[in-house]
């Protein structure tokens, strides 16, 4: 797995993350990636048992500075 991705266990939180990025939510039955400027921002990896695993790029998340 890419070093900059963090696995999360909640499909709901993964979906909210995608909405925040402006990405369309995929079906969670196959592998999927969402990239921005060549960087993977979100990923679904379906394991051998058929269960999806969710990964996000949390490195860009942080306090937002307001422009005053």
Image (cartoon, helix red, strand yellow):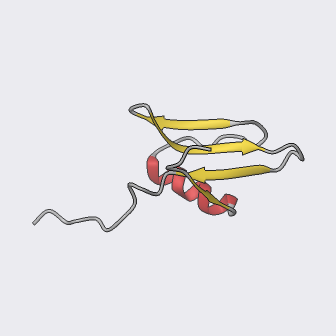
Q: From the top left corner, tell me how far across and down residue 26 is, in percent.
A: 66, 40
Q: Who's the residue at 22% across and 65% down the image?
A: 65
Q: Which of 55 and 64 is in front in this view?
A: 55
**52 displayed left or right of 2:** right
Q: From the top left corner, tell me how far across and down residue 6 is, in percent.
A: 57, 56
Quadrant where the image shows the N terminus: top right
Q: Who's the residue at 79% across and 40% down the image?
A: 29
* Residue at the farthest right position: 49
Q: Who's the residue at 19% across and 66% down the image?
A: 66
Q: Who's the residue at 49% across and 50% down the image?
A: 4
Q: From the top left corner, tell me how far across and down residue 56 is, in percent.
A: 55, 52
The vertical placement of 24 against 64, above or below, is: above
Q: From the top left corner, tell me how far across and down residue 17 is, in percent.
A: 52, 56
**60 displayed left or right of 25:** left
How many numbered badges does the structure rendering display?
Answer: 0
Residue 38 occupies quadrant: top left
* Residue at the farthest left position: 68
Q: Nearer the viewer, residue 2 or 56?
A: 2
Quadrant where the image shows the C terminus: bottom left
């Amino acid at each position: 797995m890419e070093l900059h991705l963090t696995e999360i266990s909640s499909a709901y939180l993964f979906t909210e993350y995608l909405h925040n990025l402006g990405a369309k939510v995929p079906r969670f039955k196959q592998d999927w990636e969402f990239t921005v400027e060549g960087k993977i921002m979100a990923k679904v990896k379906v394991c051998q048992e058929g269960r999806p695993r969710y990964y996000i790029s949390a490195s860009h998340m942080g306090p937002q500075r307001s422009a005053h």
